[in-house]
Structures are given as structure tokens and as C-alpha cells.
Image: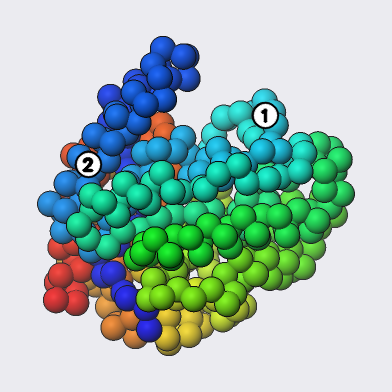
């Protein structure tokens, strides 16, 4: 079994004001790339120290070199074009940022995360985690009917290019000695929400066929890779753009299929509100995997009660072995660079809660 990090977190952290200001100045051409890199480096060192003091078991760079969790892909490839923000129709999406979509053949221009992993490995002094959007997340985010067909006549035609890019990146992260690779795949939770399933049907798609295609594509990016002791896990949530959410529903509709067919060592699952349902679907997770319970919310600032968290872990252990459980927040603190509506100190306390609860639950 891969290493279980009891005190885990999903990856992104609130950006300090200095970093936000530097990124804006860089976008306006007021500072050079190397000046932005200096600010990023300092902010990451501060974030590493915060995680160290909080007692986390695995460290990230807070995704401080990204504008949002998927930009690590968009910034490293050619073939994308920018469109204005979509109108808010259907279930809430929680954001109005411009969107990048496939407009030409997608080709890798550089490594996706080498600039992140090299600095982390050098300075963390502890196991490190790198996050990557899944194949299914990338394709469903960046393929746009009416724009993308000139390069790829169908969604399925785009899969091989994205699979190759993600697979190569994972292999290179393993070769660098990265301890923990997290695959972010929040859009699987579309299939939990009747509103989204209906929306897909109205667009002429069969949700049950879609999820099978997504699983096959994601597994293709992972199959046969020698992880050399690294942990690879998949994160699922129901949206987290500045504290907003895009869906709700128990994991039950997809639990048996997804948990038993995705080739990962474990799952990081959102359980911070009633939107996620109960722990019963955990009974479908194979006993050789880890489940990281996302019990602490990043959507609001007030801290959870440790005793309540311990009770919820005990409840989850009714359906999945205690020794295979861990704890984390339900998602990142800043999935998009603007961040969620909580303070730096509230974020710090949330991470401390993760570590404190993990020590009390597992020693």
C-alpha cells in the first residue's frame, strides 16, 4: 500500500497580498518574469513554514505559481484560445473569469510542473505534493463545441493528446522523486447532481456513457506507470471558486463504479457539508486504498470543533477501515487566485486543526 499522509491538504493556499500585487504588475508588463519569480519563491518559503508549524504531513507550494488549478496545463501548451466568460445558465458555476478553450492542435511547449517541483524538492525538507488536473477535467473544461471541432472533430478525438501530456508529466514527477501526486477531478461530481445529469441529456449526451469515457481516459494516463513508491490519489469536490459550489449530492450514484475502476492509491473526498451526503458510499472503496476525509471547510473561516471532527471520523470508520483513513480540508483555500472568503489566520487554524485531529485520531 502507498504511504498514507494522515494530516493532508488539497494543495492551494491563500495568496499573500504581495504575490497578488506582483502577479498583477507582471500582467501589466510592469515587472519582469524573474522579478515575479522572486516574489513567488519568497511566498512559497513562507507557505512551507506555515505548513511545517501547523504540523502537516505533506507540503505543497500553495499553487502560488498558478492563476488557478488548471492553469498549470493551459500555461504549458499551445492550441488554446481565449473566450469571454460564459453566461451563468444552469447550475451555479461560481465564477465569471474568461475561459481558455481548444482552438488548434494541442502540443506541449514545456513541462507542466518542473518549475514547481524543483523548488519544492529543494526547500520542503519533507514529503511534497504536486497537483495536476485530470484528463477528464482538462477535456471537459477546454473542449468547446463550435470552436474546437476544427482541430478535433469530437471530444473523444482530443483524449489521446491530453493523455500523452499528463502521462509524461506524471512519469517525470516520479523520476524527480515527488512523494505524492494528486489528480484533481472535481467534475466527476456532476454525475451526482440530477440538475447536471439533466443538462447533459438536454445537450444530447448520456451521463452514463460520459462517465465511462472519463474513467477510461483518466486510467489511460495512469496505467502501467512505475510509481517507485510515490502515492497517487484523486481529489473530488463539488466546486470551490471563491467559496462557491456547482453541485450537490451523495457519492452513491457513482461510488461503486468510480472507486473500483480508477487506478489510484486513494481518494480525497469532500465531506464538509450536507451537500456531500453521508459516509455510506465508502463501503464501495477497495480496502487497499486510502480515503482522505475532507471534513474541514475552506469555504468559510470559523474553525470546526475537534471533538466533532473525531466523531465524524469514527462515523466514517463504520464503512471503511480506520487505518486507511486520513483527514484534510474538503478542497483548496484558493482554487482560483482570488481565494476563498477567509483570512490568513483562519487558514492557518484550519491546517492546525487538520494536524491536531489527525494526531488524536491516529496517534
Query: Mark 1 sits on what residue?
Result: 82
Task: Please name the residue shown 35% across and 50% down the image.
Answer: 118
Helix, strand or loop for disc 1: strand
Query: Is any atom of residue 346 visible in this view?
Result: no
Across and down, in percent, residue 47 comes to 23, 43
Mark 1 and mark 2 residues within 8 Å of each other at the beta carbon: no
Q: Nearer the viewer, mark 1 or mark 2?
A: 2
* Residue 10 placement, left or right of 53: right
Task: Give the mark nearer the N terminus: 1 vs 2.
Answer: 2
Mark 1–mark 2 Cα distance, whole angstroms, equals: 32 Å
Across and down, in percent, residue 276 comes to 47, 62
Q: Nearer the viewer, residue 351 or 37?
A: 37
Count all numbered tags in the image, as a single digit.
Answer: 2
Task: Please name the residue shown 51% across and 64% down the image.
Answer: 171
Instruction: Give the crowd class for mark 2: few <14, some 14-19, many >=20 residues within 10 Å.
Output: some
Instruction: Give the crowd class for mark 1: few <14, some 14-19, many >=20 residues within 10 Å.
Output: few
* Residue 344 placement, left or right of 325: left
Query: Mark 2 sits on what residue?
Result: 45
Task: Please name the residue shown 68% across and 51% down the image.
Answer: 139
Quadrant in the picture for residue 1: bottom left
Across and down, in percent, residue 59 comes to 27, 55
* Residue 207 placement, left or right of 264: right
Q: Up-down: is 87 above or below 362?
A: above
Quadrant in the picture for residue 31: top left
Helix, strand or loop for disc 2: helix
Query: Is any atom of residue 152 visible in this view?
Result: yes
Amino acid at each position: 500500500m502507498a504511504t498514507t499522509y494522515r494530516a493532508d491538504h488539497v494543495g492551494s493556499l491563500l495568496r499573500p497580498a504581495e504575490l497578488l500585487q506582483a502577479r498583477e504588475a507582471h500582467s501589466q508588463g510592469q515587472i519582469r518574469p524573474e522579478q515575479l519569480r522572486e516574489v513567488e519563491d519568497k511566498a512559497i518559503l513562507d507557505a512551507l513554514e506555515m505548513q511545517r508549524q501547523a504540523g502537516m504531513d505533506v507540503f505543497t507550494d500553495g499553487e502560488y505559481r498558478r492563476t488557478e488549478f488548471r492553469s498549470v496545463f493551459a500555461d504549458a501548451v499551445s492550441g488554446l484560445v481565449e473566450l469571454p466568460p460564459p453566461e451563468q445558465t444552469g447550475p451555479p458555476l461560481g465564477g465569471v473569469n474568461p475561459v481558455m478553450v481548444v482552438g488548434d492542435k494541442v502540443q506541449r511547449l514545456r513541462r507542466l510542473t518542473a518549475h514547481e517541483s524543483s523548488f519544492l524538492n529543494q526547500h520542503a525538507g519533507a514529503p511534497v505534493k504536486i497537483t495536476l488536473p485530470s484528463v477528464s477535467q482538462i477535456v471537459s473544461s477546454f473542449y468547446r463545441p463550435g470552436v474546437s471541432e476544427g482541430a478535433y472533430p469530437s471530444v473523444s478525438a482530443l483524449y489521446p493528446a491530453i493523455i500523452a501530456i499528463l502521462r509524461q508529466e506524471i512519469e517525470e514527477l516520479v523520476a524527480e522523486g515527488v512523494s505524492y501526486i494528486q489528480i484533481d477531478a472535481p467534475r466527476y461530481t456532476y454525475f451526482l447532481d440530477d440538475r447536471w445529469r439533466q443538462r447533459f441529456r438536454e445537450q444530447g449526451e448520456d451521463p452514463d456513457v460520459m462517465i465511462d469515457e472519463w474513467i477510461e481516459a483518466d486510467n489511460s494516463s495512469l496505467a502501467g506507470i512505475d510509481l517507485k513508491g510515490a502515492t497517487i490519489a484523486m481529489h473530488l469536490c463539488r466546486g470551490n471558486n471563491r467559496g462557491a459550489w456547482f453541485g450537490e449530492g451523495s457519492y452513491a450514484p457513482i461510488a461503486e463504479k468510480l472507486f473500483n475502476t480508477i487506478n489510484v492509491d486513494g481518494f480525497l473526498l469532500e465531506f464538509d457539508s450536507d451537500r456531500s451526503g453521508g459516509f455510506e458510499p465508502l463501503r464501495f472503496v477497495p480496502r487497499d486504498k486510502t480515503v482522505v476525509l475532507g471534513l474541514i471547510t475552506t469555504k468559510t473561516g470559523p474553525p470546526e470543533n475537534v471533538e466533532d471532527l473525531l466523531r465524524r471520523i469514527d462515523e466514517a470508520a463504520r464503512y471503511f477501515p480506520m487505518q486507511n483513513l486520513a483527514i484534510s480540508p474538503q478542497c483548496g483555500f484558493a482554487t482560483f487566485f482570488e481565494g476563498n472568503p477567509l483570512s490568513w489566520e483562519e487558514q492557518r487554524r484550519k491546517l492546525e486543526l487538520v494536524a491536531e485531529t489527525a494526531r488524536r485520531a491516529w496517534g
